[in-house]
């Protein structure tokens, strides 16, 4: 035993079952709201588009390793919702892209803070793999029927060259603007401030939810019962 923790990513319940059978220590349940790529491996990415709200409870009910929810989580409400659905952790991506500390360009960060970031779509045009980003001219052109897309990672190289020129010209309409569906949920642009307020808000409320979740899991796996219990908090408190 080398003490290495392995975490797999599932975009469908079948993938979660396959990951558990392979012996991973935890599973990321990756809903289709997520920004960037998602890494489906049993079916085509286009045929693996389950949202976080549906995916997390299905996977949590099926596996006996911790589930980490990803996709569309952007503030304390999202974290609590994920814990309530059976996740034991969350993964956040898009929020951090808009923070000053992020490696994204200024044009990308500005786009993420604009209300148009509420309109995202999926494309293979950025890299050759299905990914989510803000809908702009680049995405529209690349998504046109009949547009030839190179296999990954060749398409990525092609678009990267274009992005360098677009960046220099200040043209965010021609940049690949990676983003998930909840880009507009968080307005925070400072990582420390975001995490501090997230931890404060969540820790006020998470304990009873986690205790409830743990008790529910114990009942399920020890007694093999699938009884439902009332969630002890009202989410409207947030
Ligand atoms: C720019 C970007 C690239 C990503 N690339 C990958 C990837 O190659 N493979 C993967 O499994 N997840 C990838 N992700 C997904 C993240 O790991 C994470 O699950 C996701 O961002 C969480 O959802 P959210 O963006 O709604 O917060 C990427 C996310 C972003 C924002």
Image: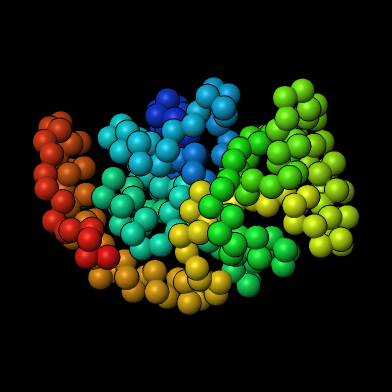
The image shows residue 208 at horizontal and vertical percentages of 18, 60
Compared with 224, 217 (above or below) is below
Is residue 24 visible in the rendered image? The answer is no
Residue visible at 58% across and 64% down in the picture: 113
The image shows residue 173 at horizontal and vertical percentages of 75, 52
Tell me where residue 117 sits by quadrant.
bottom right
Tell me where residue 55 sits by quadrant.
top left
Is residue 144 visible in the rendered image? The answer is yes
Q: In which quadrant is the C terminus drawn? A: bottom left
Residue visible at 17% across and 44% down in the picture: 216
The image shows residue 215 at horizontal and vertical percentages of 16, 48
Residue visible at 29% across and 69% down in the picture: 203
Compared with 83, 193 (above or below) is below
The image shows residue 151 at horizontal and vertical percentages of 77, 29
Report the label total. 0
Compared with 55, 84 (above or below) is below
Residue visible at 56% across and 72% down in the picture: 189
Nearest to the observer: residue 183 or residue 6 = 183
Is 232 situated left or right of 169 in this image? left
Tell me where residue 122 sits by quadrant.
top right
Is 215 situated left or right of 96 in this image? left
Color style of the picture: rainbow
Is 70 situated left or right of 123 in this image? left
């Amino acid at each position: 035993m080398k003490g290495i923790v392995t975490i797999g990513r599932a975009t469908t319940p079948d993938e979660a079952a396959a990951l558990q059978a392979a012996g991973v220590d935890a599973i990321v349940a990756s809903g289709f709201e997520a920004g960037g790529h998602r890494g489906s491996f049993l079916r085509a990415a286009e045929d693996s588009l389950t949202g976080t709200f549906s995916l997390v409870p299905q996977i949590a009910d099926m596996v006996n390793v911790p589930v980490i929810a990803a996709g569309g989580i952007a503030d304390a409400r999202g974290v609590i919702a994920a814990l309530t659905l059976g996740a034991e952790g969350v993964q956040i991506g898009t929020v951090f892209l808009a923070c000053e500390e992020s490696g994204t360009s200024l044009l990308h960060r500005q786009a993420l803070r604009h209300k148009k970031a509420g309109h995202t779509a999926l494309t293979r045009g950025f890299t050759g793999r299905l990914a989510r980003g803000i809908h702009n001219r680049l995405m529209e052109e690349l998504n046109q029927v009949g547009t030839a897309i190179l296999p990954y990672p060749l398409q990525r190289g092609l678009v990267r060259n274009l992005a360098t020129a677009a960046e220099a010209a200040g043209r965010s309409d021609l940049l690949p603007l990676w983003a998930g569906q909840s880009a507009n949920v968080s307005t925070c642009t400072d990582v420390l401030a975001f995490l501090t307020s997230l931890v404060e808000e969540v820790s006020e409320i998470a304990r009873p939810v986690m205790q409830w979740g743990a008790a529910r899991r114990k009942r399920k796996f020890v007694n093999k019962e699938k009884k439902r219990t009332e969630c002890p908090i009202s989410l409207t408190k947030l």
